[in-house]
Amino acid sequence: MVERYADRRTAGRVLATALARYAHRNDVVVLGLPRGGVPVAFEVARALDAPLDVFVVRKLGAPGHPELAMGAIASGGVRVLNDHVVAWYRPSAAEIDRVTAFEWHELARRERAYRGDRQPIPIAGRIAILVDDGLATGASMRAAVQAAHSLAPARVIVAVPVGAPDSCRAIADVAEEVVCLMQPESFDAVGLWYDDFSQTSEEEVRTLLAESLPAADHRKG
């Protein structure tokens, strides 16, 4: 196992080797969490001969306390609420709807920016492999898993090149399988485990999705 990854795409190629049993199947979809997870997911999808899509997740911050997640929305029109936070903070239904509407607008903007006119790949009945460049707190990935489950996949698999050990263990509570290659005890931050952790641009996400279209097309139906 490498001690550090050169960049996200290198990490994706390494991660793909741990997912080889899912290669060349017609029931697998690889979903990258934008933006940093998409270059990783691109290499995974290419190695597995599977379609690639983005899975956009937006946190629903509590009114007046945006850092406090009272839920999340995600691709596919899914909203999940954190019952514990809602019960404690007690936002009104109108407040929840207002925050949700704002975040739906931003989610729709991002999906248009990433996909253009391309339609989302359905995941119902399929094995959905959710990929990010790493797991720090795991909050975004947990929301993504819960949202993905709402779209009725056969299974949800979380796959990351590196993650905090506690986060990798905790995400197993909601996903059917977790592949977390490197789990350094002195984790600190995802970027420390990459030589090149430069920001992934929207243009790079668009380009990678466009390059993946042949794989997506021949898996339709």
Image (cartoon, rainbow, N blue to C red):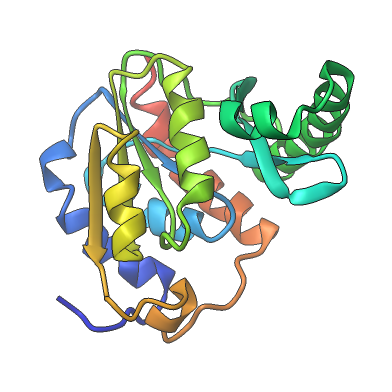
Q: Is residue 82 above or below residue 67?
A: above
Residue 185 visible in the displayed image = yes
Q: Residue at x 47, y 45 (%)?
A: 141
Q: Where is residue 69 shown, x and y percent of the image? A: 66, 42
Q: Residue at x 64, y 35 (%)?
A: 85
Q: Is residue 63 left or right of residue 122?
A: right
Q: Point out the residue furthest to the bottom here.
A: 195
Residue 160 visible in the displayed image = no
Count of numbered tags? 0
Q: Residue at x 27, y 63 (%)?
A: 13
Quadrant position of the C terminus in the picture: top left
Q: Is residue 78 left or right of residue 7?
A: right
Q: Is residue 95 left or right of residue 124?
A: right
Quadrant position of the N terminus in the picture: bottom left
Q: Where is residue 27 shown, x and y percent of the image? A: 26, 23
Camera-side residue of 45 and 128? 128
Q: Where is residue 154 shown, x and y percent of the image? A: 28, 18
Quarter of the figure with residue 77: top right
Q: Is residue 192 above or below residue 45?
A: below
Camera-side residue of 177 and 216? 177
Q: Where is residue 175 shown, x and y percent of the image? A: 31, 34
Q: Is residue 163 above or below residue 27?
A: below
Q: Is residue 66 left or right of residue 40?
A: right
Q: Residue at x 27, y 75 (%)?
A: 184
Q: Point out the residue furthest to the front here.
A: 88
